[in-house]
Amino acid sequence: MSSPSNTTSVNLSNNNSTSAQQYYNNYFNGTLNVTSNQNDAVNAYFQSIASNPQAAQILASTVIYTAISQGLNPMSIVQQFQEVPAGQLNYYLAMFLNLNRVGTSLVGINNQPIQNKYITRAILA
């Protein structure tokens, strides 16, 4: 005696939805269109100000990615960085890179708690 069922087996090997599979496999792999001239110019700028060439290259690629994802021209961003006073570039760069980051993982932001002498005394006591 067989039990009646309204479900039939599905052969998953015959699934032809490769477009959906490609979409989800490449979801985080967006294509960036930047010319070689722009790439070289941004890399040269960060190579000139950084002491570590590998860090300069990674920073340049991050700035290019952030600029393009925000719909900005990477060369205009570099021109704005060139106008920043010498000691202030790290702050401007951190704020620019935070445009694409979630609030829980911001770069270069140090939130010091407000020092309250009553709270400090209660903790130390």
Image: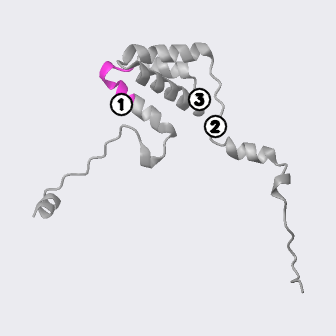
Give the prevailing secondary structure in the magenta stretch: helix
Residue closest to the far bottom: 1
> Residue 73 location in percent, x, y?
58, 23
**Secondary structure under badge 2?**
loop
**Secondary structure under badge 3?**
helix
The answer to which of marks 3 and 1 sits earlier in the sequence is 3
**Looking at the rendering, which quadrant does residue 50 occupy?**
top left
Rendered-image quadrant of the N terminus: bottom right
* Residue bearing mark 2: 29
| Mark drawn on residue 91 | 1
Q: Nearer the viewer, residue 9 or 98?
A: 9
- In the displayed structure image, the side of residue 111 where residue 58 appears, left or right: right
Judged by depth in the image, the label closer to the viewer, 2 or 1, is 2
| Residues tagged 2 and 1 counted as in contact (Cβ below 8 A) | no
Q: Which residues are magenta?
A: 84-92
| Mark drawn on residue 68 | 3
Which residue is drawn at the image coordinates 19% and 52% (left, top)? 115
**Secondary structure under badge 1?**
helix
Rendered-image quadrant of the C terminus: bottom left
The answer to which of marks 3 and 2 sits earlier in the sequence is 2
Which residue is drawn at the image coordinates 40% and 38% (left, top)? 107
Residue 86 lies within the magenta run = yes
